Structures are given as C-alpha cells and as structure tokens.
C-alpha cells in the first residue's frame, strides 16, 4: 500500500481507503471481516458519516484494540432522528450525534472532523459565519477533532472552502462521469494528448478546484469514485463502455490534491479488488484509452452532469437531481439517505415548471423536464 500526504494536515493516508457506508447492510461479523481485510491490506483511513447506531457500534467493535491504526473521518451534522438519517445544523442535535459517534467507535477523538454535506453556497456562508464553525473550532482546540474538513459535491463550495483558511481538507465526489465535459463530434479529440498530463475534458470549475486545493495544501479524499457502481457496466455508464475498479481508482488518484479514494466494500473480495490497484500494470490502470474508444453516441439521451442546462428559473440544481435519480435507479430499494439528500435541496424536481429552457441548452438531448418529474416521484418524502 502506498501512502500520501493529506494536504498540509501532516497525516499520511493510504491512497485506497474505506468508505464505510456499505457496511450498514451487514452484521457485526461481516463488518469485522471487511475491516480486518482492510487493515491487513494497509488501508488506514475510514470515513463514517452514517448516523445509524448499529453500524457505528459494529465499526467500533471491529477497530477495538487497533484504534491508532485508523485515521477516522467523522461527520458533524449527520444525525439519527426518529429511526432515520437527518442532516441538521441544530447544534444540540449535532453535539449529541457527534458524542454518539465517539462513544460507539470507542474513541475520545476524531482525526478529521467533517462539516457534513454542504452543497449550496448560501449554506456554506451561513456555516462559516455562524455558530456551526465555532463549534468545530472549539472541538479542535479541545483536541477532540484534530483537523476540520468539509464534505461537498459542489465545486463552487469546495473552492470557497479551500480558500477559507479554516477548512483543511475536503471529501469530494470524483469520477470521470462527474468530471467530464460534454463530448465533441469526435470523442477521440479529448484524448489526443496525454490525458494525465492535462485537465482537458474536465469541467473547468472542477479543474479549478483541484488546482486550488493543490496550491493551498488542502487535501482531498474521494467519495463516489465508482459512481455507485454505475461505471462498471456499459449499460449504465454514460460513456457506453465499462471501467474497472482499478481504472476508476487511477482516475481519482491522478487528480491534483487527491490523497485517497474511499471505496465502499460489501465483502473482503471487494477490498481485494480495490487494493489490486497497487500491483496493477499501467495497461490495467489506463482509463483514457477506454474512454477514447467509447462509442461517440454513448452520451446522447444520458445526463453527464455537465451543468450546461443551468440556470433553472426555479433554482433547481438539475445536475444534482439527476445524479440522485440515477443513483436511486441503480438500487433495488431507494436508500433513505439518498431521499434525505434529495429532500434537503433548496429546490428539487417537484419545483420544475416544465418550461424546458434547460432542454434547449442540453448537448445530449436529455428529456430533463420528464426526468425531474420521475425523480420527484421516486425521491419525494
């Protein structure tokens, strides 16, 4: 296992980490097996944002006696209320949930205290200018958290965080489907030069975020590196061709400022498939050639989250709604957490007025108004 500096935090993290969300599906013995496999492979960073009590307890039991091995990302603002996940900024509930995390993990500190899930610029400012950030800073002064981080899917929020001098690292969603600009007439044009040596083909806002984080020493840990598994099948990949776990990992790890990709594992075999990256050949890592040879029509009718549909007169983040909708369609049952994230948007598919101005701007002919209606029907409370 190789290790990387996480920005200026002084922490060295395994370049392949553990995103523990999938462990919610498993009992204590299965959780122990996955975490033991991670430890043996040299994985040393674990993200636990989930407030579900049982999974926290199971993770705590699995790392008992080996706490110092782990660099833990724990989240501020992810709470369990009435038997379900609720993101909140109410400090009384935030404090109780964070104490619960400490107790169930069997620790008195968290290495990376993450301000949980900030995807709107207006909310970022409320957090940074109010009592929420002060609470995080107090925890840091007390040594209960060692560094302050933030999780976001929005590159504009990420940029503000990186430039704030308060946020030391980011948990950010990175994969080719989220990063890529729309295709040209010939997709091969994107890869005429060495892709790893440039940021051609990537949304300029995301490219700028990666550069700023690199310049300012704000490390990035990666979530959604597999796009929920969507990239593993040509039928669900927006490129019309499948990528392997190794190729997805390589894509994430070649972005500036990225220190670790936090993959989800159901089984020890999933762990082994991820850590196979460490011994993979350059040919096995090569995602660029795969994308360069993808069918040019693969994008048509599929949302690539490029954002060209904006602005929406109703204020809907269309790309974000489409991401949630696509992730929901991949699950046999829509996770409550996904519904909660959707419902937390300041405007969602239910606010669509059907003007279709977005569809005129979409380069891929996506029936956006129809998707907004379907997304709302699937994800509403």
Image (cartoon, grey):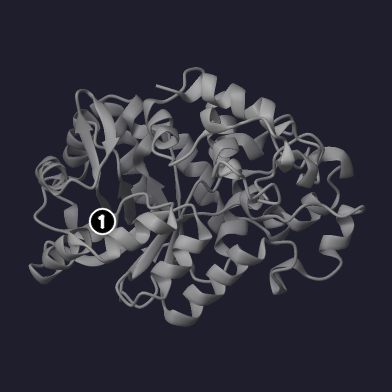
On screen, residue 96 above or below 286 = above
Task: Decide: few, some or many residues near mark 1? Use Cα within 10 Å; few <14, some 14-19, many ≥20.
Answer: some
Q: Is residue 323 visible?
A: yes
On screen, residue 241 above or below 373 = below
Residue holding disc 1: 70
Quadrant housing residue 371: top right
Q: Nearer the viewer, residue 50 or 241?
A: 50
Give percent across and percent down for residue 365. Answer: 81, 37
Q: Residue furthest right?
A: 185
- Which residue is rendered at x = 71% and y = 42% of the image? 358
Q: What is the quadrant of the N terminus in the image? A: bottom left
- Which residue is rendered at x = 10% and y = 45% of the image? 92
- Which residue is rendered at x = 82% and y = 61% of the image? 190
Q: Secondary structure at mark 1?
A: loop
Quadrant housing residue 61: top left
Q: What is the quadrant of the C terminus in the image? A: top left
Q: Nearer the viewer, residue 361 or 160?
A: 361
**Left or right: 80, with 208 as reference point:** left
**Left or right: 4, with 141 as reference point:** right
- Which residue is rendered at x = 22% and y = 23% of the image? 83
Give percent across and percent down for residue 55. Answer: 24, 32
**Left or right: 54, with 231 as reference point:** left
Q: Is residue 330 visible?
A: no
Give percent across and percent down for residue 311. Answer: 63, 50
């Amino acid at each position: 296992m190789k290790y990387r500096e996480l920005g200026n935090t002084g922490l060295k993290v395994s370049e392949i980490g553990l995103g523990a969300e999938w462990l919610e599906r498993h009992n204590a013995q299965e959780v122990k097996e996955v975490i033991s496999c991670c430890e043996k492979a040299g994985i040393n960073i674990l993200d636990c944002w989930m407030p579900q009590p049982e999974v926290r307890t199971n993770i705590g039991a699995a790392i008992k006696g080996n706490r110092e091995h782990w660099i833990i990302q724990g989240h501020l603002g992810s709470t369990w209320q009435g038997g379900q996940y609720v993101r909140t900024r109410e400090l009384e509930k935030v404090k109780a949930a964070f104490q619960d995390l400490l107790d169930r993990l069997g620790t008195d500190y968290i290495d990376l205290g993450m301000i949980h899930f900030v995807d709107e610029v207006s909310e970022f400012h409320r957090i940074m200018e109010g009592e929420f950030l002060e609470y995080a800073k107090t925890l840091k002064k007390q040594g209960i958290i060692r560094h302050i981080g933030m999780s976001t899917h929005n590159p504009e929020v990420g940029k503000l965080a990186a430039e704030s001098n308060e946020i030391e690292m980011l948990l950010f969603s990175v994969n080719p489907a989220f990063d890529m600009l729309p295709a040209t007439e010939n997709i091969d044009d994107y890869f005429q030069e060495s892709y790893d040596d440039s940021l051609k083909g990537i949304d300029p806002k995301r490219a700028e975020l990666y550069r700023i984080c690199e310049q300012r020493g704000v490390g990035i840990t990666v979530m959604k590196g597999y796009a929920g598994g969507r990239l593993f099948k040509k039928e669900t990949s927006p490129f019309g061709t499948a990528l392997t776990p190794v190729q997805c990992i390589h894509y994430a790890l070649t972005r500036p400022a990225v220190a670790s990709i936090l993959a989800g594992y159901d089984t020890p075999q999933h762990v082994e498939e991820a850590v196979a990256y460490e011994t993979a050949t350059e040919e096995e890592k090569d995602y660029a050639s795969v994308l360069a040879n993808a069918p040019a029509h693969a994008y048509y009718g599929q949302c690539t989250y490029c954002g060209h549909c904006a602005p929406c007169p109703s204020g809907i983040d269309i790309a974000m709604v489409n991401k949630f909708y696509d992730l929901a369609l991949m699950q046999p049952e829509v996770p409550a957490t996904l519904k909660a994230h959707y419902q937390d948007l300041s405007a969602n598919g239910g606010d669509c007025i059907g003007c279709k101005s977005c569809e005129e701007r979409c380069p891929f002919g996506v029936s956006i108004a129809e998707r907004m209606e379907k997304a709302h029907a699937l994800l509403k409370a």
